[in-house]
Amino acid sequence: MNRRSFLQKSALAGAGAAVATTLSAPNVWAKGKTYLWRMVTSWPPGLPILQTGAERFARRVEELSGGRLRIEVYAGGELVPPLGVFDAVSQGTVECASCAAYYWAGREPACQWFSAVPFGLNAQGINTWFYSGGGLKLWEETYAPFNLVPRPLGNTGVQMGGWFNKEIKGISDFKGLKMRIPGLGGKVLSKAGGTVVLLAGGEIYTSLERGVIDATEWVGPLHDLRMGFYQAAKYYYYPGWHEPGTCLELIMNKKKYESLPKDLQAILDIAAAESNLWTLSEFEAQNGEALQTLVNKHKVQLKRFPEALLKDLHKLAEETLEEEASKSKQARKVHEAFKVFKEKVGAWGKISERAYYDVIG
């Protein structure tokens, strides 16, 4: 071997070693400090898309982080009561949770706008508000006093109007009606003369079957079929005026989140955004078949709320939103921002989405 050949081979070997060192760096980093989080949820064990989606989110975080961040997931009641997850994360008992913002109206009325607004934005609209219209910044601002960081974790799309044991022909039929319905929609029902009963998912069927409640809303055909509501109620109404695009949330303890390396914070954010898209896609893909099963196999009576009733509910909803907005400075701020954004995207929606649907019938 001559000197030139030796030097060339030495240079190539050195370059190869440098490349190998660079390529192995992530693996060396992955063997560094690891983190173990616990996630609690408001969902029953095994509930498709909601509970299984939380478990999927945890797997994705572990995959994307190369095992540096693992999340153990507990369904509602396994570690924390379904409606106790907000406090558990806020206080740092656990690191994160999967739930829905309208459950926390008692902590701050503004929370309700980040889940579902009656006659408000659909899934596409609320995602646009969060990601491109300032909604997420308002959400973070609302949760900061509770030591929480929120992220959209999924959307159900337009929900069904609910299961009833009597026909609903007009606004007077809501008087005295005991219904499981959370959030701002529940407050509209109260204004119409109904009685709101707030129940976790695992308690609904038994309460409906035993007559503790006269009606319930949950999500849509896929879940309603699995929950067996068709065995306990006679009529299945649509559309879901009360929840036109319900956002599910990931809430994280703010101190725990901010103590993570920046790349792990980004992984949590990215995995949550992916879960947000996945959840809506799953609901849209599976609700149609489930609806056919309910109607064709179980002979469910599918009914549309009368137009006059929907107009009455819309009016009551506007009154309710103003009343709820007056309960706190933050609620007023969020409500006004939501209204402005809804009007802005609505002007475009009338000549895009709405016009298209009118054409295709």
Image (cartoon, rainbow, N blue to C red):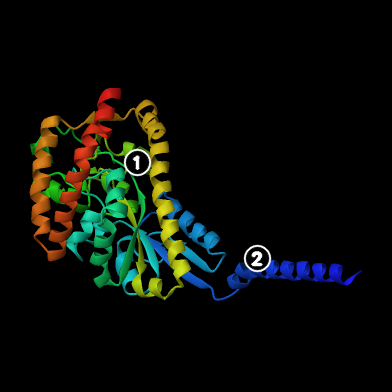
User: Which residue is the site of mark 2?
Assistant: 23
Mark pair 2, 1: CA separation: 49 Å
Residue depicted at 32% across the width and 36% down the height: 230
x and y, in percent, of residue 44 in the image: 39, 54
What type is the residue that disc 2 sits on?
Answer: Leu
| Residue located at (30% from left, 23% from top) | 360
Instruction: Determine the secondary structure under disc 2.
Output: helix
Helix or strand or loop: what does disc 1 sit on?
helix
**Quadrant position of the N terminus in the picture:** bottom right
Which percent across, then down, holds residue 339?
16, 50
Residue 305 placement: quadrant = top left
Q: Which of the two residues, 211 or 54, is positioned nearer the viewer here?
A: 54
Query: Is 82 on the left-hand or right-hand side of 120?
Result: right
Circle 2/circle 1 CB separation < 8 Å: no
Q: Quadrant of the C terminus?
A: top left
Residue 265 picture location, percent across and down: 43, 67
- Which disc, if any, is residue 65? none
Q: Determine whether 53 is above or below 284 in the image.
A: below
- Circle 2: is it few (<14), some (14-19), or many (20+) Cα within 10 Å? few
Q: Is residue 259 visible?
A: yes
Closest to the camera, between mark 2 and mark 1, is: 2
| Residue identifier under label 1 | 224
- Between 190 and 197, the one nearer to me in the picture: 190
Residue at the outermost right position: 1
